[in-house]
């Protein structure tokens, strides 16, 4: 009797877990289906040559998404250039160099930064960073691709720092001691042994950090000026720009459901989705490689 | 001739316990000196003083003198990096880096700026031969270091230490986790090595000291109870505590 009860109980639990697992797959598929069904009509509404042209002006039926794609890329690239070196160096500092008490202060600080709502960062951008850039670089406006890059870098940094730092902390202490015992200096040990040993974790941190910047909306919408211009020269960094995310966020609310504009916005969503998918696939490839390596070590 | 002269060495860890107490000892050059005694006696602490690895541990107080080639290495102005190149150590657990077999031996030299391929190749071969490992890995130098057995890994660590051409080689229970074959190879290697190096070993049992040591120091609870030739220690120990330990009454 008792045993029977347990068995039924087990079954219920198993089914519940199964249901949760399957339903999350279902949701993802539904979202994907929705995105595709609303986005692909754009390909019929707007000729392909126009879709990938340089002019985004929906009121007059110009639906060129090229400036938006390039805008996103420029800002993401800029953010990576800021966040990757800074993030990794900070992680190395916290994990390898800082004394214990400083670590204790810096770790929660980084976590705090990670939890900062992006709208607050946008505030900071509008009130501090943008006027500062305008005045020091003598620009017509402080709302530029550069402003967006700097602030997005700020969003990616905490992710990069905390995951890289975890990776560094997971490097066995014995590696460091072995290296120091050989008479290598602290720097040689850090760059020659510790960082390479944490390489895959650090790469994953970078991908996840970059992934966050691609999808980030609120901050870029607030500080990049939102002018859909194709960035061609380096000068473009100091001019307003518009990203895919900002476009969707600002225009989706006013668009007539089922119109060409509506479908194109969804199409942009698909493009964005492909970008983040790419980054995630790379990141998970890195992490699975890491797994294989640790398996090798264990065997 | 004495390579290392230790005078009145005392060490206290941050927990306040005196782990080495007034140690006086002379370690002769080109010989194997074994440090024996029950665990917690201070053998590892003593070894870690000799290349200042204790700088990384929670040591609060070190007093006394440790002269290597006549120079006091406890002097704060001592170049620790140079010291560690001169006094290499092999730990009890084999700790290869996640690199290839070849790289594990070459990376120390490479990080020190040696780039010439032929020099590196020669150094790697020489070190692996000294560690009695060459024949087993010469065909697979570029396999990952963790693809070889634990015993081979430990000899790889010995080769890594040897690659930098130290003068003193210390081994802290190097064979405690190894099979008999690898243990024998390491012992053979050490007997060969003492021609060119000064070897200090904390063996994981007294039998090993009996097989390879020329001199034996018996550590008990942070004190050096007795230090003399291996023959004397094993056949006519002066101290009754040494006698009890050798005959297996405690340990
Ligand atoms: N890093 C450390 N911090 C505090 N105490 C230590 C540390 N290392 C060793 N000790 C203490 O020093 C004493 C000697 O230890 P150790 O040198 O490891 O002896 P052995 O190698 O002979 O077993 C022990 O009482 C041990 O608890
Ligand atoms: Mg020990």
Image (cartoon, helix red, strand yellow):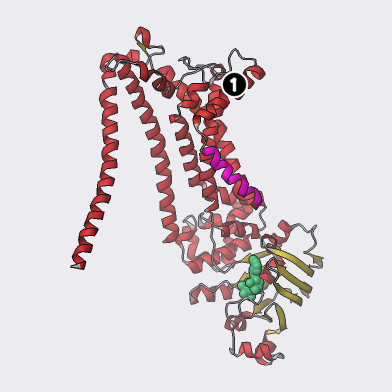
Question: What is the magenta range?
Answer: A101-114
Residue topped by disc 1: A130
Of A231 and A267, nearer the camera is: A267
Quadrant assignment, res A129:
top right
Q: Position of residue A93 (x, y in %)?
A: 62, 45
In the picture, measured across the screen, residue B250 lies left or right of residue A251, that is: right
Query: Outermost residue toward the top?
Result: A60
Q: Position of residue A4 (x, y in %)?
A: 18, 64
Q: Answer above or below: position of A177 versus B115.
A: below
Of A148 and A125, nearer the camera is: A125
Of A28 and B233, nearer the camera is: A28
Q: Position of residue A48 (x, y in %)?
A: 31, 16
Q: Position of residue B236 (x, y in %)?
A: 69, 92
Q: Residue at x 59, y 65 (%)?
A: B158
Q: Residue at x 67, y 88 (%)?
A: B241
Where in the image, quadrant-wise, is ligand 2 located? bottom right
Asked if residue A154 is among those painted magenta in the image, a careful observer would answer no
Image quadrant occupied by the N terminus of chain A: bottom left
In the picture, measured across the screen, residue B212 lies left or right of residue A221, that is: right
In the picture, measured across the screen, residue A9 lies left or right of residue B184, that is: left
Asked if residue A110 is among those painted magenta in the image, a careful observer would answer yes
């Amino acid at each position: 009797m008792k045993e029977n009860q347990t068995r039924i109980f087990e079954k219920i639990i198993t089914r519940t877990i199964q249901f949760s697992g399957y339903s999350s797959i279902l949701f993802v598929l539904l979202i994907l289906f929705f995105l595709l069904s609303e986005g692909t009509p754009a390909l019929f509404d707007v000729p392909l040559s126009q879709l990938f042209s340089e002019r985004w002006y929906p009121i007059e039926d110009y639906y060129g998404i090229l400036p938006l794609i390039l805008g996103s890329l420029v800002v993401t690239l800029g953010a990576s250039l800021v966040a990757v070196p800074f993030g990794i160096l900070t992680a190395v500092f916290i994990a390898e160099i800082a004394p214990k008490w400083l670590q204790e202060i810096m770790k929660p600080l980084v976590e705090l930064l990670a939890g900062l709502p992006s709208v607050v960062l946008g505030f900071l951008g509008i009130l501090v960073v943008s006027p500062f850039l305008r005045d020091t670089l003598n620009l017509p406006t402080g709302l530029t691709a550069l402003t967006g890059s700097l602030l997005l870098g700020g969003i990616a940094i905490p992710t990069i720092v905390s995951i890289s730092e975890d990776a560094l902390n997971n490097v066995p202490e014995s590696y460091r001691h072995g290296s120091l015992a050989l008479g290598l200096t602290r720097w040689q040990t850090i760059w020659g042994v510790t960082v390479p040993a944490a390489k895959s974790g650090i790469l994953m941190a970078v991908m996840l950090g970059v992934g966050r910047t691609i999808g980030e909306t609120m901050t870029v919408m607030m500080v990049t000026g939102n002018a859909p211009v194709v960035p061609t020269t380096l000068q473009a960094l100091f001019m307003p720009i518009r990203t895919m995310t900002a476009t969707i966020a600002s225009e989706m609310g006013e668009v007539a459901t089922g119109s060409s504009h509506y479908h194109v916005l969804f199409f942009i969503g698909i493009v964005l989705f492909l970008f983040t998918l790419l980054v995630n696939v790379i990141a998970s490839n890195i992490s699975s490689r890491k797994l294989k390596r640790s398996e090798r070590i264990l065997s | 001739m004495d390579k290392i002269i230790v005078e009145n060495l005392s060490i206290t860890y941050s927990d306040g316990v005196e782990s080495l107490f007034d140690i006086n000892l002379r370690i002769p050059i080109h010989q194997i000196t074994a440090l024996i005694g029950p665990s917690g006696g201070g053998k590892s602490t003593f070894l870690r003083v000799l290349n200042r690895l204790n700088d990384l541990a929670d040591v609060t107080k070190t007093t006394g003198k440790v002269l290597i080639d006549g120079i006091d290495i406890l002097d704060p102005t001592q170049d620790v990096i140079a010291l560690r190149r001169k006094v290499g150590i092999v730990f009890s657990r084999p700790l290869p880096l996640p690199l290839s077999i070849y790289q594990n031996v070459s990376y120390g030299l490479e990080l020190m700026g040696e780039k010439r391929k032929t020099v590196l190749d020669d150094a790697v071969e020489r070190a692996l031969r000294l560690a009695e490992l060459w024949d087993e890995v010469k065909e697979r130098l570029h396999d990952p270091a963790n693809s070889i057995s634990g015993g081979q890994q430990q000899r790889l660590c010995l080769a890594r230490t040897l690659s930098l051409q130290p003068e003193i080689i210390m081994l802290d229970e190097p064979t405690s986790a190894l099979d008999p074959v690898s243990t024998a190879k390491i012992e053979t290697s050490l007997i060969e090595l003492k021609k060119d190096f000064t070897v200090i070993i904390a063996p994981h049992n007294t039998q090993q000291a009996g097989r390879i040591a020329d001199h034996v120091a018996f550590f008990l609870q942070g004190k050096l109870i007795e230090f003399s030739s291996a023959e004397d220690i094993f056949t006519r120990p002066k101290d009754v505590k040494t006698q009890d330990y050798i005959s297996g009454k405690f340990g």
